[in-house]
Amino acid sequence: MGMGRRIRLAGSIAASKLALTAAWGSSESSSTGMFYQNEEYDWMYSSSNIAMKVEGCVWATTDDNEDVGCMEDESGDGTTYWYQMAMCRRAQVAFSVYSTDSGSTSCGSSHFKGTFVTQDGLSEFAALMETYDGYSPITEDALGDIPMCEQGSDGYYLSVGCASDGSFTIDEFNDQYCLQRVGTYTYLSDVNSIFKNYFHSCYGIYSANTDESVDYSAAGALVGASKSCSALDTTVCQDTDRIAYASSGKSASFSNAGQKIANFNIANKAKYALGTLCLIGSLFMFLGILFTNRRKRRAMMHRKMRASRSKRSSSKKRSSSRHKSSSSRSKSRSSKSRGESSRSRSKSRARSQSSKRVDDGVFA
């Protein structure tokens, strides 16, 4: 653990003890303690015994980027991977907590309260256990000087890592922020033996008979410094009844939502199909009306042409009949005039002959 982390941890412990002595003067005033009113932690204050069981090593996020060798939270260091440091990950301790209202805790499923993961690594777990548990089998001295993303002699960077079986190791990394793992450097055999012998079974971290308050016990310190996890985060963590119920509700809601979406898709497909059919029908109607109107226009044009032809022929007939009647009239007129002229000529001839005859008879 870094020097800064140790100073902050010692300060928090001293502040906690000072807050305990400077309480409101009533034992009931510390019933909520350092934890806010949340039903997730109500079980702590009604428990007579609390125990834990270490599940193993988990590669999880940390909130202490400075002391564990993480990159800064901003791009001031000039690197290109600064945005990844909002989720800086280090080897953490995952532990399940069990409690009972009366009697001893058996770490069974009926007493299970949740699985938690430390946020500052293996060193934090050892420091909290050493501070709040006078008989803790794990201490900072037992850990020794473990590297926390420090450069080794062979050019690689060394830091605490997790093996596939959940044990703690020292791993090699390519980069100075321990983001690119190369492989396992060595196993922390002594630490793994402590966890296997003491913490893989049920280990008591609070007793109402010996501890003054749950807030200032190993249980309160570990739960307060850690965050809860579930099987959705890693297979090492276990789901509580609330999370399992919520997950089942979510799965049911997801299935219902999927069914509704499927029904909605079917309805949409039916609407699209009906709309396509209506569009095709409208297209055929338009083409039919277009061709029908074209035929009607052709028929009207033919009728107009026939009517114009019939008008032309009737006008020609009328003009020819008029011409014939006028010619016949002129002929009759000319024949009448000829007859009258011949009559007048004959009359004049008769007159002239009779006058000659008179003349001949008188003068004879």
Image: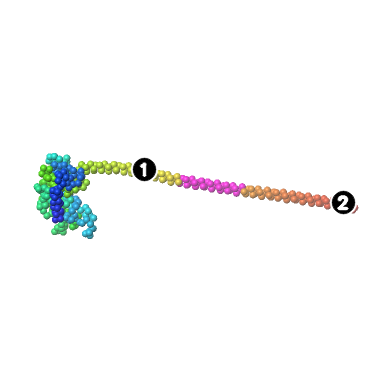
Instruction: Pinpoint residue 103: horizontal percent, then vertical percent.
Output: 12, 40
Residue 314 or residue 22, whichever sits in front = 22
What residue is shown with label 2?
Answer: 358
Crowding at label 1, few (<14), some or many (≥20) Cα neighbours within 10 Å? few
Q: Which residue lies furthest to the front in this view?
A: 25
SS at mark 1? helix
Depth order, front residue of 26/3: 26
Q: Can you give x and y, in whole percent of width and height, for residue 228 in the image?
A: 19, 47
Q: Inspect the magenta stretch and tell me whether residue 171 lies in it.
A: no
- Name the front one of labels 2 and 1: 1
Distance in Å between CA atoms under marks 2 and 1: 130 Å
Q: Which residue is drawn at 23% across and 58% down?
A: 75
Q: Of all residues shown, which one is farthest toward the right?
A: 364
Q: What stretch is highlighted in magenta?
A: 287-314
Label 2 SS: helix
Q: Is residue 314 visible?
A: yes
Instruction: From the viewer's perspective, tell me whether residue 298 is left or right of residue 165.
Output: right
Amino acid at pointer 2: Val
Q: Looking at the picture, does residue 184 appear above or below residue 41? A: below
Q: Disc 1 marks which residue?
A: 270
Q: Quarter holding the N terminus?
A: bottom left
Residue at the extreme bottom of the image, as rendered: 78
Where residue 164 appears, as percent x and y from the top left, is 16, 49
Residue at left offset 16%, top offset 52%: 120
The residue lying toward the viewer, choosing from 62 and 317, is 62
Magenta span: chief secondary structure: helix
118 vs 330, left or right, is left
Query: Which amino acid, by three-letter code, is at mark 1?
Result: Ala
